[in-house]
Amino acid sequence: QVQLVESGGGLVQPGGSLRLSCAASGSIFSIPFMGWYRQAPGKQRELVAGIFSGGSTNYADSVKGRFTITSDNAKNAVYLQMNSLKPEDTAVYYCNQRARTTGWGPSSDYWGQGTQVTVSS
């Protein structure tokens, strides 16, 4: 079983910064993809940023140039540096890791517990 633990959310003023962290534990063979999603009240969960094991990244248009996703494959960890935060970034942020627990089986999606990010003055 794979478990994800997130940290780093909180309350920040507009223009401020936060860094989210997510570490996976358990029986992991490989992690082809790691990502951060968010869900605001009354809205669908959306992909904010993703990083593939080869290092390529993708971002939602709304966060390009402000957010940066990085990973530490040795630690099975993924990070999201959020700068120039706006009130519309307020949401619960969820870590996602698409992991294989064996070398021959398919990958499965694992989710963190979610962390609240609130941007308000």
Image: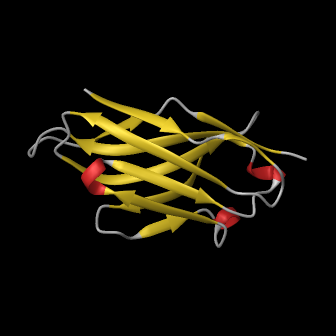
Query: Going 37% across and 44% down the picture, which residue do you hit?
Result: 97
In the depicted view, which residue is nearer to us: 121 or 51?
A: 121
Residue farthest along the top direction in this orientation: 1
Q: How is the image coloured?
A: secondary structure
Residue 114's place in the image compared with 8, above or below, is above
Query: Going 44% across and 43% down the picture, which residue do you hit?
Result: 22
Query: Going 56% across and 46% down the picture, which residue do you hit?
Result: 37
Hey, which quadrant is residue 4 in on the image?
Answer: top left
Q: How many marks?
A: 0
Q: Position of residue 109 (x, y in %)?
A: 36, 38
User: Viewed as shown, does residue 59 lie left or right of 72?
Assistant: right
User: Viewed as shown, does residue 26 lie left or right of 9?
Assistant: left
Residue farthest along the right direction in this orientation: 121
Q: Is residue 110 visible?
A: yes
Hey, which quadrant is residue 56 in on the image?
Answer: bottom left
The quadrant of the image that shows the N terminus is top left
Residue 38's place in the image compared with 55, above or below, is above
User: Viewed as shown, does residue 6 lie left or right of 87?
Assistant: left
Q: Position of residue 2 (x, y in %)?
A: 29, 31
User: Viewed as shown, does residue 51 lie left or right of 42?
Assistant: left
Query: Going 38% across and 41% down the picture, which residue do you hit?
Result: 23
Q: Position of residue 118 (x, y in %)?
A: 76, 41
Q: Position of residue 99 (x, y in %)?
A: 27, 43
